[in-house]
């Protein structure tokens, strides 16, 4: 159902006045730019287990308390700790070029010294016996373990300019490379590559390689994924599409390739990790909860602007507005900034397990985790009575806020494994707020380009108004 319903006759004057004030404050008195600058530019990436995410947790608590909102950091367990420093990567032979790249998350460094090594390609193997026989050749070398892309031009450039025959040829080449280099078994090695270096990286490390080199370019030029490694001695790096292709072609042609690494990182062992929880306590039914939800952790190749800085900022700013317009709600309004979503939603799952009383009292949960665009779709996580309430709330929203929203009704939890699922499985009415893409998957998601400048602040402010209004109506 698409809601563009006249609202004047459907709400009392108090509700209309509060909704109007929320809309006005979200637009005219927004602090989203200031908060985004502090979170993304000054604090930066927030990898689970890193000192940076703990600094960010503390900033969240201080900010909420400065607004007169109760807040705390709540330990959920431990995670492997890691500190990222600089990544200096240079091609020094057969010519000199500074390469665009960085360490994968949790990679060991080079003990703050230069490491100069030759490169070698991971060849095709028919079985694991061939792989084991080959391993001595890789000792002391940098092993290239990813497919070289046939082009680093964005897909849209090919669609706009290439002939149909060229496009078809390119797609066939890409499909062939994907089949050869990805999947559970990496070309007969018996080890998975997964989304970082996986089991293959650990086996190469055991063989004494100097490091592992990978690349997962996106459709947008210059954008590549930066995931994780479990290596503890041999560093793992990701290169841009262009520079990985350069090193791969030189190595493949037999050129005397030498690459210099100077990587600063510390493996910190097990570290405590925290959710940040804030709330405006209910005045009438304090044990019933309206929950705003967004994960706080990020991958750390950039600053995590759209995954999930924008979700974080949306919920922060909504709480600030609610404190101004609705300081004594009937029900408690709680916000959860979860750690470890990228590691399997461990933070939100821990909260649900540790607080069964809160879960029992949850009247609604609103989760956002997919980019900077304005919310277009709301999904209802399979709960049949959710439609009764959500349709009534949406019908009361000002047209400028609610007219573009489609409510999908009962169905699967939103997204591909976000934090709303941690609560939907307990029977909580958990709604996923799904936003317009703005090339999220092709450009910013989990990439080295997920930075402040990718935020569309007009859309973010609209989302702040939406979630604050829904929380007000639910509370």
Image: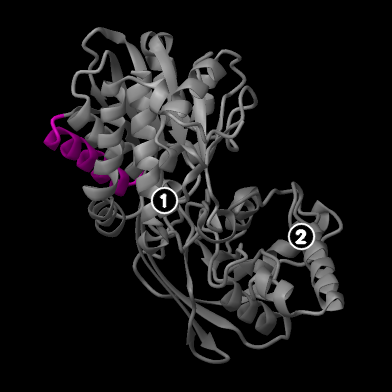
Residue 470 quadrant: top left
Contact check, label 1 and label 2, Cβ < 8 Å: no
- The residue that disc 2 covers is 178
Task: Point out the image quarter for the C terminus.
Answer: top left
The residue that disc 1 covers is 459
Q: Which of the two discs, 1 and 2, labels the residue nearer the N terminus?
A: 2
**Residue 116 part of the magenta segment:** no
The residue shown at (46%, 30%) is 346
Residue 23 shows in this picture: yes
Q: Nearer the viewer, residue 186 or 403?
A: 403
Q: Residue furthest bottom?
A: 95
- Viewer-proximal residue among 41 and 397: 397
Compared with 128, 473 (above or below) is: above
Circle 1 sits in a helix, a strand or a loop, which is it? helix
Give how far apart the Cα atoms at labels 1 and 2 are: 35 Å
- Residue 451: x and y in percent read 39, 60
Image mark for residue 271 = none
- Please state if 26 lies on the left or on the right of 340 as rendered: left
Can residue 338 be seen in this snapshot?
no
- The one nearer the camera, 362 or 324, is 324
- Point 57% across, 25% down: residue: 380
Please indicate whether residue 20 sits to the left or right of residue 237 in the image: left
Residue 400 vertical position relative to residue 472 in the rendered view, above or below: below
Residue 384 image position (x, y, % from top left): 61, 14
Q: Which quadrant is the N terminus positioned in?
A: top right
Q: Tell me: 425 left or right of 400.
A: right
Q: Position of residue 116 (x, y in %)?
A: 48, 78
Q: Which element is circle 2 on?
A: helix
Q: Which residues are magenta?
A: 48-68
């Amino acid at each position: 159902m698409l809601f563009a319903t006249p609202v004047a006759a459907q709400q009392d004057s108090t509700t209309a006045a509060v909704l109007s004030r929320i809309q006005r404050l979200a637009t005219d008195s927004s602090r989203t730019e200031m908060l985004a600058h502090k979170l993304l530019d000054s604090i930066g990436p927030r990898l689970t287990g890193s000192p940076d995410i703990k600094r960010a947790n503390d900033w969240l608590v201080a900010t909420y308390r400065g607004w007169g909102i109760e807040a705390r950091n709540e330990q959920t367990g431990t995670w492997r700790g890691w500190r990222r420093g600089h990544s200096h990567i240079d091609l020094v032979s057969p010519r000199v070029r500074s390469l665009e790249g960085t360490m994968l998350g949790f990679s060991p460094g080079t003990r703050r010294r230069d490491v100069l090594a030759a490169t070698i390609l991971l060849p095709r193997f028919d079985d694991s016996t061939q792989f084991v026989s080959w391993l001595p050749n890789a000792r002391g070398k940098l092993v290239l373990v990813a497919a070289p892309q046939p082009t680093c031009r964005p897909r849209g450039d090919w669609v706009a300019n290439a002939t149909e025959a060229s496009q078809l040829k390119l797609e066939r080449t890409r499909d062939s490379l994907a089949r050869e280099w990805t999947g559970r078994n990496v070309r007969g090695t018996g080890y998975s590559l997964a989304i970082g270096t996986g089991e293959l990286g650990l086996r190469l490390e055991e063989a004494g390689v100097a490091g592992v080199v990978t690349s997962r370019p996106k459709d947008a030029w210059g954008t590549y994924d930066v995931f994780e490694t479990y290596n503890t001695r041999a560093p793992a790096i990701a290169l841009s599409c262009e520079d990985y292709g350069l090193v791969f072609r030189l190595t493949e042609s037999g050129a005397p390739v030498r690459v210099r690494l100077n990587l600063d990182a510390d493996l910190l062992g097990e570290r405590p990790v925290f959710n940040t929880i804030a709330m405006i306590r209910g005045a009438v039914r304090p044990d019933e909860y309206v929950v705003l939800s967004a994960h706080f952790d990020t991958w750390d190749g950039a600053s995590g602007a759209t995954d999930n800085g924008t979700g974080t900022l949306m919920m922060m700013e909504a709480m600030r507005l609610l404190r101004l317009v609705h300081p004594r709600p009937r029900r408690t309004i709680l916000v959860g900034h979860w750690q470890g979503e990228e590691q399997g939603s461990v933070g939100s799952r821990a909260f649900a397990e540790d607080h069964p009383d809160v879960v029992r009292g949850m009247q609604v949960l609103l989760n956002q985790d997919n980019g900077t665009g304005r919310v277009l779709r709301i999904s209802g996580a399979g709960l049949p009575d959710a439609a009764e309430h959500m349709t009534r709330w949406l019908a009361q929203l000002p047209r400028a806020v609610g007219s573009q929203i489609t409510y999908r009704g009962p169905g699967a939890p939103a997204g591909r494994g976000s934090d709303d699922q941690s609560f939907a499985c307990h029977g909580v009415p958990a709604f996923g707020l799904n936003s317009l893409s703005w090339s999220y998957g092709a450009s910013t998601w989990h990439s080295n380009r997920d930075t402040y400048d990718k935020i569309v602040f007009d859309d973010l402010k609209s989302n702040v108004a939406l979630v604050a209004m829904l929380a007000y109506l639910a509370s």
